[in-house]
Structure formats: structure tokens, C-alpha cells
Amino acid sequence: MKNSTLLLLIIFLTTNCSEKKKAEENEQDIMNNILTTYNEMYTSYGEGTDDFFKYYENNFIRVTSSGDIQKGIEKPKIEWADYLKIYSVYLKSFSTPEIIISKKQAITIGDYEEYFINRETKDSIYNRGVYVASWREQEDGSWKISMDTWHAGLDKE
């Protein structure tokens, strides 16, 4: 009986440690996937097109810096396209975000510096801000933004 109990205890500990290590590896994989996608999204944004919207769910929620709440991808894409008719984008920098992970969801919190350059006058607007996004795992295993918000104008250059 003692040997059976000892054997069960060893099996339990081995299985428990293996599951814990697997969960830690899974969390690290999620962190890596989110960071890669975040970097791709910001790089795409910095190119000054609307291609970065491919990193958003079609029905994502956006809380604008004025506090308005938008739902869906079409209105932000139209507004961005209209903005790009007047301004080009120069993304000076974006930080490695803090990433908070929960089941099938992750939050990124990062900051950025950018310039918007008037296409006609060449005058520029400096902008520094923070960006917060909620990412949700998709059925295919990819990650997309389900909600975002930002606060711009943290300081003036």
C-alpha cells in the first residue's frame, strides 16, 4: 500500500509540474504572438495607409480621445482615409507595450510619438500619447484588436 501511495504521489507531482510548465510556455507563446502582432500593426500604421485595420475585428469598439464610442471598422477607416488626404504620417517611435494576459484576451499598454505632416503646407503636428488595446484570440489562433483607446497630446515638442 505504501508503494502504491508513493507511486501515485510521484505521478501526481510529475503531471502537475508538467501542466504548470506547459501553461507557462503557453503564456510565453501568447506574449510572443501579441508582441509580434502589435509590432506589425504599428509598423503598418506608420506606413500611412489603412492596412493596419486588418489587425482589428470588424466589430471592434473604439473609445476616441474625445470620449466618443464607435463600434465597427468602417467609420474609423473612412475617417482615417479622409485624414490621410490632408496629412501624411511619420511614426517616430512606439514602445514595447506592457502586456497583460487573461484567458483568450490580452491588453497592451504602450506609448508612441508621431508627426502628422500637412501635405500642402508641409507644416507638422507633433503628437505623443498612450495607446491601450484589448486583443482577442480568433478562431484561427491569430490575435486582433477588439477594443482600443488612446490619449494624445501628452506633451508638446
Image (spheres, grey):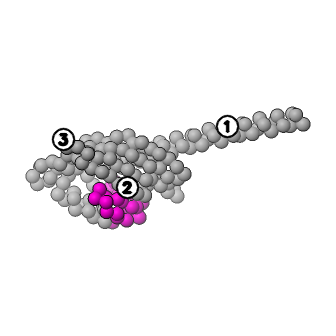
Residue furthest to the right: 1
Residues packed near mark 1 inside 10 Å, few (<14), some (14 to 19) or many (20 plus): few
Q: Judge whether residue 127 can be spotted in this image.
A: yes
Residue 90: x and y in percent read 23, 46
Q: Is residue 106 magenta?
A: no
Q: Earlier in the sequence, mark 1 or mark 2?
A: 1
Residues packed near mark 3 inside 10 Å, few (<14), some (14 to 19) or many (20 plus): few
Residue at (40% x, 52% y) in the render: 133
Residue 10: x and y in percent read 77, 35
State left or right for residue 154 relative to residue 10: left
Front residue of this view, candidates 116 and 152: 152
Q: Mark 2 belongs to which amino acid?
A: Asp
Spatial CA distance of label 1 from label 3 is 52 Å
Spatial CA distance of label 1 from label 2 is 37 Å
**Residue position marked by numbered label 1 in the rendering:** 17
Q: How many marks?
A: 3
The span picked out in magenta is: 50-74
Check disc 2 and report its element: helix, strand or loop: strand
Check disc 1 and report its element: helix, strand or loop: helix
Q: Earlier in the sequence, mark 3 or mark 2?
A: 2
Q: Mark 1 belongs to which amino acid?
A: Cys
**Residue position marked by numbered label 2 in the rendering:** 148
Residue 121: x and y in percent read 9, 52
Pointers 3 and 2 in contact (C-beta within 8 Å): no
Pointers 1 and 2 in contact (C-beta within 8 Å): no
Residues packed near mark 2 inside 10 Å, few (<14), some (14 to 19) or many (20 plus): some
Residue at (37% x, 55% y) in the render: 148
Front residue of this view, candidates 49 and 91: 91
Residue at (34% x, 63% y) in the render: 69
Spatial CA distance of label 3 from label 2 is 25 Å
